[in-house]
């Protein structure tokens, strides 16, 4: 599907660089930056009318922030693939 945003995370605690992408299908995918393979997929953002159009990693690379046209910023625990916080 169509990729709307991407954010690169240099090597983190697991020793692997990650690439996060958001798609028009309202999913955020984590890719293994070294091998180019899908690593994890966050659950589809079914509560949103809009997909994530902005992505940003935390400085340590353990959280990912997503935002879209609905003006909601969500903070995801990248290791557990769960939403931890939401700013409305």
Image: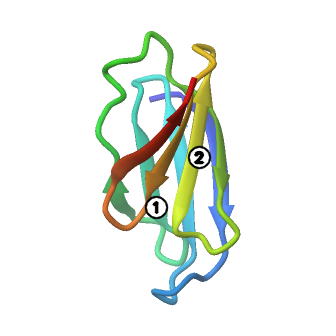
- Can you tell which quarter of the image residue 54 is in? top right
Q: Position of residue 58 (x, y in %)?
A: 65, 62
Q: Position of residue 63 (x, y in %)?
A: 53, 60
Q: Identify the residue position indicated by label 2 in the image.
A: 65
Q: Position of residue 47 (x, y in %)?
A: 34, 18
> Looking at the image, is mark 2 or mark 1 nearer the viewer?
2
Assign the C terminus to one quadrant of the image: top right
Helix, strand or loop at label 2? It is: strand
Q: Position of residue 7 (x, y in %)?
A: 66, 53
Q: Identify the residue position indicated by label 1 in the image.
A: 31
Left or right of residue 83: residue 34:
right
Query: 87 or 52: which is nearer to us?
Result: 87
Closer to the chain start, of discs 2 and 1, is 1
Please give the name of the residue rendered at 54% of the width and 45% of the height, measured from the top-left corner: 21
* Up/down of 24 relative to 14, above or below: above
Helix, strand or loop at label 1? It is: strand
């Amino acid at each position: 599907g169509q990729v709307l945003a991407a954010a690169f995370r240099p090597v983190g605690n697991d020793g692997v660089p990650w690439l996060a992408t958001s798609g028009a299908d309202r999913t955020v995918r984590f890719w293994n930056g070294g091998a180019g393979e899908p690593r994890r997929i966050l659950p589809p953002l079914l509560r949103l009318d809009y997909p994530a159009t902005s992505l940003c990693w935390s400085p340590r690379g353990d959280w990912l922030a997503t935002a879209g046209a609905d003006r909601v910023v969500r903070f995801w625990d990248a290791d557990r693939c769960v939403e931890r916080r939401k700013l409305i």
